[in-house]
Amino acid sequence: MPSSTSSSNPEARRPIYGKTLLAIILGMSAALGLVKAFAYINDASSETILGRVLEAKAALPQIVKEPQELAMVFGSSMVRAGFSPREFDQHLNDQGIQNIKSFNFGFGGLNPFFQDFLARRIKEAFVENDRRLKLAVIEFNPFQTTITRHQGALPIEDSFITMLGTEKEFRKILMDDPTRGVRLYNIKYLRDSISAEMVTSYFAQSFQEPRNRTELQRNEEMDKKRNELGELLNAAFDKEYPNYVNSQWSYEWQGGGTIAAERSPETLAIFEDYYATDLDPAKLDDDRLNRIHTADILEMNFSDELLEAFIRIVNEFKTFSDHVEVVLLPRNTDWIIYPESGKKRLQSAISRIETATNIKIKDHQNLPMMKPHMFNDTTHLNRYQGATTYTQYLAQQYHHFLIDE
Amino acid sequence: MLFNTPIFFIFLIVFLLFYGFVFLRHKPKIYFILVSSLVFYGTWNYRFIPLLVGSAVIDYFLAQAIYNSGQQRKKLLLTLSVVMNLGILALFKYADFVIQSVADFLNILGYQADLGSLSWVLPVGISFYTFQSLSYTIDVYRGDMKPRKGLAEFTTALAFFPQLVAGPILRAKHILPQFHKLPVPTWDMVCNGFLLVTIGLFKKTIADLLAGPAAMAFDGGAVSVLETWTGVLAFAGQIYGDFSGYSDMAIGIAMLIGFKIPLNFRLPYFALSPVQFWQRWHISLSTWLRDYLYISMGGKHNRIRNVMITMLLGGLWHGAAWTFVVWGLFHGLIIIATHQLGNSSVFAGFAHSQRFFNKLSKWIITFYLVLIGWVLFRANGMDSAWQIISQMHTFSGNLPDAGSKALLVFSLTVAALFFMHIMDYFVLNKTPQLMAKWWLFWPLLIIIQAICLLIGEPTNAFIYFQF
């Protein structure tokens, strides 16, 4: 191993610093290479983590160039499951409103802090192209806005920011807080948006104490039947959609899913049976306990920061939308029963949003036409019963905003 | 700007580029280190730069004056230096503590006292650089060293970025000659530096992982004796990994530039007595307290008093809270007890025995006492400390309450604690052999770096920055 020694000639001193720099850069590059290899092996990438969001974001330039008037339902996974844009358009068409194209912008795993970034991207796309939304329906999801949910998302915060933010936003962060700015650039460009915190939180799950589990006995017969029906439905899908190109946010389907009109009566019959297997009380109770644990869905201790983020979202949409509606989506009233304390907090949060946005929130939690059997768990509507019914309701409620004046 | 952040990585690369290739002469290099160090410091709070530079300038001139003065004036000038350094420390760090303690005392006496608070932000690293600066004037006063010529060199040494915010606390007579010479590192030194930076980073990473179980016990989440012990052990690992990891990185970064900074930790949890623990834990502080406080008060001549005062002030150095005071006093007590027992005819044999089981017993007792100390150190108050200590010793048979994962977390905590020491043992004893095998050395470093890049906690500031 060569050894540099002290020298009175400054020129002779340079090699050691050159070697040191080279060792730092090569060593760090190799270590980052290993990190990338680890992410690759574990299939961790921005596409696998936020694929649906990124596909929807990428579709924005195409959306704003649509010749029709545009409508958008924006929210959480409850919107993703509960709104069927093509059926919505069809209902409007049936009512003589033919010039509307609606999109489902519902995404799981995004609390309002992250949704705010996406809302800014949507606004940019519309403003740059001088387009407006004819109707924006924004879901206020109380379960995504709790302190519990917020804290659970902290380890992934920087990763998601790098996936949803823009260069301009990164530069601003860099100017305000260089340490954080450099960190974000590092995560985005050297780590493919996979931060160390995200990796740690993923693996740390194995060391956490298990949450409360249901004491009800799982119906094994039902589970077995469900698996069998699932296989039949997969086969039916392959048969009925032979040319389907796999995507998490399908432009062709306007961000929604399949619709009943495209399915055979046999397939729909299988779905009826399949949905019945969702109603195993043990499965639903366990789902409820999980959501209490991860999102505090009954007590709803709200995060100030997330409420403020939600208010920003609504105000952003107002700048490029002709009409903005804020709604609470239907609730599975058999399983999600708020205590008085939860109800009070929810009411207080609603009042705060209404005051800050000047928009009256429409509470669709207890719509009489929405029944507990229309849910495939404690929060999400199923497609051919729940989403279909709710989409029809939305079309009836809001069609007057979409009539050409 | 923490050592384990990407921005420091960029800072270091830019620093090395300019230091190695642009500034080639002595004076520009000194000024460049000074400016870089102030930039490094300024990323925390640039408003405290004048305080750092100001105390360096004053101590520089006070040391010159002390050297050139007669005995009477010398004493006065030293007093001035001590008052200035400790005064700054007292004002920023202890003023609110004193105000609050007085108010509490008055309340106990029945007076409703609300004396308010200053609520000043504590300048990062103030406890380290004031002690460092003070050691210079004391050394000159004692005649242990002559004052150095060169204000820039002195200020640069005090502000030297690798050790500025969390030590080790350098001695003027050790570091100033290096700034005068500006040594060029050898390749072996650079490799050693890389090893220390990597090991330090790894220990910091482990410390961050241990923060979770530690917080669980200290913030009231532990439900069983097992979880409480896990939390206390985890904190022992967290504070060791955090602080010794930072020290390793500081020493390693200094080595990359050519500077030698003395060791700050030497396997402290393998100590066989409380006295030995303090010879191995935060060595730069414990030797500072020994040389400038304990010995100044007379050392062994009034051991009990001197040890207690030294440890009390050592505890208070760590923070302005009664828990730190009690922690210091606790360590003072166990150090005195060790001395007393070692000198007694009954225990002397045991104390000096080299037999395996005796050594094992001494290790268990020492480690247990250190853990009790950490409870006092970390707890959110004396009530909380007492509750945790009680919980550690309340065998209510509720092990199953802890849940199925508790035993796994306990085992991993113990393993992490042990692993950090094993790693340090190899660094202390096997570094030359490891460096000779380059085909093992470099891949090992890269793999460890990669592991560190894969593990992260959102709140990962170094604990010792608050002191």
Image (tube, helix red, strand yellow):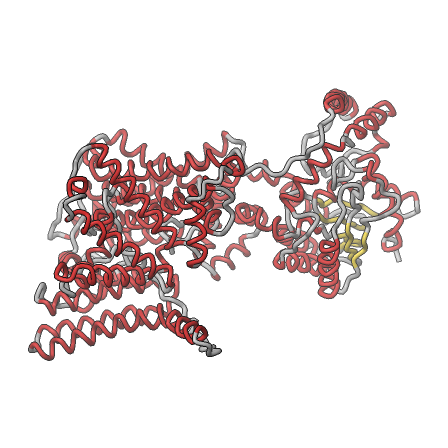
From the viewer's perspective, is residue B366 above or below residue B138?
above
The part of the image, by quadrant, that contains residue A382 is top right
In the rendered image, which quarter contains the N terminus of chain B? bottom left
- In the image, A342 versus B424, the foreground residue is A342
Quarter-wise, where is residue A266 in the image?
top right
Rendered location of residue A206, percent (x, y): 52, 34
> Going 31% across and 65% down the picture, which residue do you hit?
B126
Looking at the picture, does residue B93 appear above or below residue A50? below
Residue drawn 15% across the image and 65% down it: B296
- Looking at the picture, tell me which residue is in the foreground, A382 or A162: A382
Question: Left or right: A12 with respect to B233?
Answer: left
Q: Is residue B28 left or right of residue B91?
A: left
> Where's residue A67, x and y in %?
79, 48
Tell me where residue A120 appears, x and y as whole percent: 64, 55
Residue A227 point in image, percent of width and height = 72, 22
Question: B45 and B355: which one is in front?
Answer: B355
Most distant residue in the front direction = B346
State the residue at coordinates (23%, 33%).
B357
The quarter of the rendered structure image containing the C terminus of chain B is bottom left
Q: Is residue A404 above or below residue B84?
A: above
